[in-house]
Each structure stands twice: as structure tokens, then as C-alpha cells.
């Protein structure tokens, strides 16, 4: 089992910045990749960013150039630096891990990000 605890959400004005953090615990040796999903009200959950064990990154087109994902392997923590935030970034953000041996997925409980116009 891998447990995920997010922090860093909150209310920010458009154009502002926030940094999300997610600390993993438990069977962290099973982690293949870490990332962030988000779900806005009335919309489907979408993958925002992903970082592999080899530090390859992938971003949704909607956040490229504004968001940066990084990880501290020693702390089993992944971060999402969000700059130039827009009202459409308002969502619950979920930490995500891709697991191996056996294959699986896990998500945190989510942290709310609200961007006011």
C-alpha cells in the first residue's frame, strides 16, 4: 500500500502562484511515476502533469509553460509549482502514483485550488 498526503491548496487571485506538495509513504519502492490529476466542478478528471523515476515529465497542453512538476526522491515527495493561475485552473487536485509489482494506481484525497478572477 502507498499512502499519499497532499498539501498547499487554497485561494489565489488570477495571475498568482501556488505550490502543491504530496508526500508518499508505505510501499514507496513500488512507485514508477508520480503526478497530479485535477477535477473541476462538472468536468471529468484530467491528468495535469507526470514525472517518472527517470525525471521525464509530461504536461497537459492547458498548463504547459505555467506549471512545473518536480520530485524529491529522498523525501518521496512530488511538487507542482503553479504560476500564472487562471480561473479555469480551479479544481480539486489529486496526487497520483503509478505503481509496479503489482501494477496499480493510487490517488490522494485531494486539495482544493480556487482561482478568483
Image (cartoon, grey):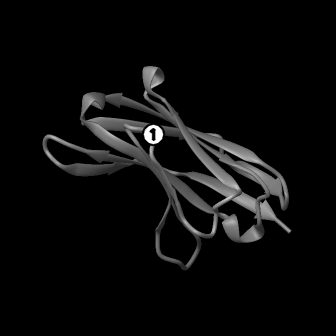
Q: Nearer the viewer, residue 33 or 7?
A: 33
Image position of 83 with respect to 43: above or below:
above
Which residue is depicted at the point 39% across and 38% down?
Answer: 54
Where is residue 14? Give x, y as percent. Answer: 84, 62
How many other residues sit within 10 Å of disc 1, few (<14), some (14-19) or many (≥20)? few
How many numbered markers are drawn? 1
Q: Where 39 sits versus 56, above or below?
A: below
Residue visible at 85% across and 58% down?
A: 15
Outermost residue, left side: 102
Label 1 secondary element: loop
Above-or-below relation of 33 to 11 = above
Tell whether 114 sits left or right of 3: right
Q: Is residue 95 visible?
A: no
Horizontal placement of 88 versus 110: left or right?
right
Locate residue 98, reporting x and y percent: 31, 48
Would residue 107 be seen by someone viewing this image from the given angle?
yes
- Quadrant of the snapshot with the N terminus: top left
Identify the residue at horizontal 44%, vertical 26% (top origin): 73
| Residue 69 as seen in the image, left or right of residue 89 | left
Tell me where residue 93 sits by quadrant: bottom right
Q: In terms of image quadrants, where is residue 64?
A: bottom right
What residue is pinned by disc 1? 55
The quarter of the rendered structure image containing the C terminus is bottom right
The location of residue 110, given as percent across then percent down, is: 51, 51
Closer-to-camera residue (89/41): 89
Picture coordinates of residue 37, whole percent (x, y) = 49, 58
Amino acid at each position: 500500500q502507498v499512502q499519499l498526503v497532499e498539501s498547499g491548496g487554497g485561494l489565489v487571485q488570477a495571475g498568482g502562484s501556488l505550490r502543491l506538495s504530496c508526500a508518499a509513504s508505505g510501499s514507496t519502492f513500488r512507485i514508477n511515476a508520480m503526478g497530479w490529476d485535477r477535477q473541476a466542478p462538472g468536468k471529468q478528471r484530467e491528468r495535469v502533469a507526470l514525472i517518472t523515476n527517470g525525471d521525464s515529465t509530461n504536461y497537459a497542453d492547458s498548463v504547459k509553460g505555467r506549471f512545473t512538476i518536480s520530485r524529491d526522491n529522498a523525501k518521496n515527495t512530488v511538487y507542482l509549482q503553479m504560476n500564472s493561475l487562471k480561473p479555469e485552473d480551479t479544481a480539486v487536485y489529486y496526487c497520483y502514483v503509478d505503481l509496479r509489482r503489482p501494477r496499480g494506481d493510487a490517488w490522494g484525497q485531494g486539495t482544493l485550488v480556487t482561482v478568483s478572477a
